Amino acid sequence: MASARQTPEGIHGLQTLVRNIVSDIVGENSSTSGTGNANLPPSNVGPVNPVDGQSSVTQELHARFGVPRQVYSPLQNYGRSREPRRRNRRQTYLTNPPIRSTSNTRAPQTVSKSDFYIKNVILLPAPSYNTVPRGDTKSYLISRGLMIDAFEIDQKWEQEELIARLHELFKNVLLNESQSVVKFEFVKSGGTKISSVNLPHGQHLSARILKHVVGNGPVYIRALEKLSCEIQPGDEESEFWTESLGPVPPTSTDSECCEITECLEQESLGPVPPTSADSECCEITQCLQQESLGPVPDSVQASSHNSDAETDMVKVLQEIFPDKQYNELFSVSSRSATLQEAIDKLLDTQGTIDDDSEEIWMLPLSAIKYQKLSGVEALKQFINRIRLLDEDQQYLNITREESIISQVISKYKNPRFDIRKPLYVSFRSSGTAELGVDAGGLTTEYFFQLVNELVRGDLNGIRLFEGAQGHLLPRFDYDLISGNIMKLVGRIIMHSILNNCRGLSGLSPAVVTYIVTGTRDAVLENLDIEDIPDPCLRENLRELLSCSGEDLSKFMDYNNPSNIADIITSSGFPHIQVTDTNKNLAYECCFVHEVITKRIPLLDDLREGLMSESSMGTGLLNLASMHKEVRDIVFPPPSGQIDLVELKRMVQYERGFMRNPDAVVARDFMNMYMEEMSQREGSDDEQLGDLLQFWTGWPSLPMMDETLTITFLAKEPSKVLAVVDTCFKSLAIPTIHSSYEAFRGKMDLAVGHGKVGFGRL
């Protein structure tokens, strides 16, 4: 095979194959392909015989190399031809498709609407019922069978058939006291009022018209007589029913009609049937004028205007007394000739008010309603009106090793920190988060620690208060005044009260009096020499009262240790020298100046912070001025002995514990333990205050008269210590101890280690 390829016949066959390929590509036949190309061999090669297999080779080349090839044109679409896109038409799906007509004319396809609609039907049981029933009133109508749900009404019903159907629907209740059938009328609701249906003259209220009148609301029908199912006078619910119906607008009174009747009878005009309708009174008035009986009395002519005048008076009274019911205001206005008389009558019903008390008359008018409540109840209502329980929580993460004041002071400076919103507190100790979920207990401990630090701690090295416990005063410092720090302290106290915690304890009674009243003259009777924080000045003032004669000159001598000349000058003492006749005045000027006068800017800032939140103009200090209980909650007196009787009154043991003998023994041990703790005053052992701090998070009784719960742990060797849920004020005591000594020891251990911090021992 290798030698055969070198023969001329083999070369001639290869040339012939090449010529055939080139001819097919350029579109020329084999006889002329070589003459036009200089690169091809000479044309002395003879034509190719078609029988040499040229056709089969050409076809194979065409199949393998895709020749002849076409020149690409960008204007030509070489893809598969596509049919034009059909537009999808949305089809309407019908529940009941119409039947097609067999005729050539196609009838339009329509959907037949239902002839029925469903409505709730409410029967109002008295003609005087003019208020849309809501809430308890609606529940009452349902209980009496006066409201039917989902009643099916045919739009083809005419008025007579519609009335007959509704009579059949309420046949058991459309009866009067004599068990006769009562007719009714169709009414409609407009806002909160019930009004009559006004149709054009000659048009009947068919079922189709009724659907248009009621719209999306229920169908109201009102009995033309009082139904037997309505509450009778003297019934236990009569007061509720009266409030539900509301007052009937006043018309011409019976007394006025009686006066007109008597006047007619005196003039021999014949007896007049007694009535109170406005139209009949107008006819009587015209009759009087025709008979020349003189003008009708003004009271009778103005009867139609009394309703508008009384309504205007009621509107004014509602603005002044927003907590009063409309019925009460309407009743008072109808019995009062002037607005001032109505206000006086309402104020008399608020409770006993001491006219000589200036504090009462300085209160907002809206605060009078708290006067007749107890202090705790008034504070509860005040807190509930201010708190925003539905808002998002505000989070505080407190590190115990650092100053709490320094951590939170920026929060209270930020106006976006709303003290009315719920608070969620978490603690960190030694870099580790304490195991406590705040449902109230952690918040209580936060405010207890914060309030204690306000009294004993400092802010960036500046003490906020000075003096002994029970005689604390705001420290007179320029930085505290310029930084409005006392205003922030007032907001902190207000925040504590809103979270059912107590306020700042240990303040001087004179300072508390000024904060509550805002007047310096009211504090004089509460001043105490111990309120002066400087012990040297206290001794000098005591000595001033006991000195006389020439010894008084030393108080003005700058070289004498008893010198108080600068203080006397600052206090506004009007004399140059202290003598026997004016030494008491000098003493009083120095005393009041040192305790109150020079601290007034600080005390006013504290007052402003406490009044930062109010309800309808009533602030926390207004309640404190009315109720001593509130004052003792906002400014608790120095910690004293806890009343054991009051503590036991608040304690409630687990239900059914009497069936468990071990629980009964533990209950007796707990009572003995509380009695022993009440006698430990002055010792280093745990006391009742420590027990309450372990129990509730605050070392005093709950201010809102809450319940303290005691439950019992299972009798297991691992449960020897008490466990407390501070958030719910629930204390679980062990039942495994058989002796009181063992019980007392484990309780002291639990209280001592668990009263601060959260987690299980």
Image (spheres, rainbow, N blue to C red):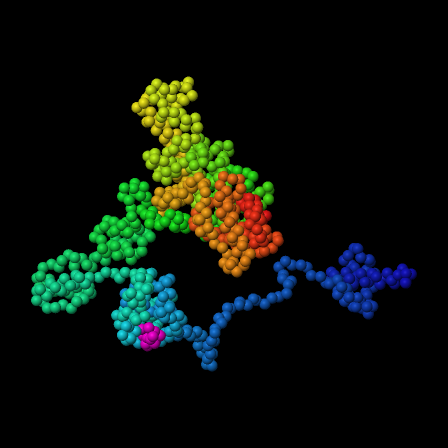
Question: In the depicted view, which residue is nearer to us: 269 or 453?
Answer: 453
Q: Is residue 681 left or right of residue 116?
A: right
In the rendered image of this protein, does residue 550 appear above or below residue 296? above
Q: Position of residue 671 (x, y in %)?
A: 50, 50
In the rendered image of this protein, does residue 122 appear above or below residue 40? below
**The magenta stretch spans which residues?**
161-174
Q: Position of residue 212 (x, y in %)?
A: 35, 68
Q: Is residue 66 left or right of residue 384?
A: right
Using the rendered view, name the quadrant where residue 248 is placed: bottom left
Question: In the depicted view, which residue is nearer to us: 610 or 698?
Answer: 698
Q: Residue at x 60, y 55 (%)?
A: 716
Q: Residue furthest right?
A: 3
Q: Residue furthest bottom?
A: 102
Q: Position of residue 342 (x, y in %)?
A: 24, 51
Q: Is residue 70 left or right of residue 756?
A: right
Q: Is residue 559 visible?
A: yes
Q: Residue at x 49, y 49 (%)?
A: 440
Q: Position of residue 449 (x, y in %)?
A: 50, 41
Q: Is residue 443 visible?
A: no
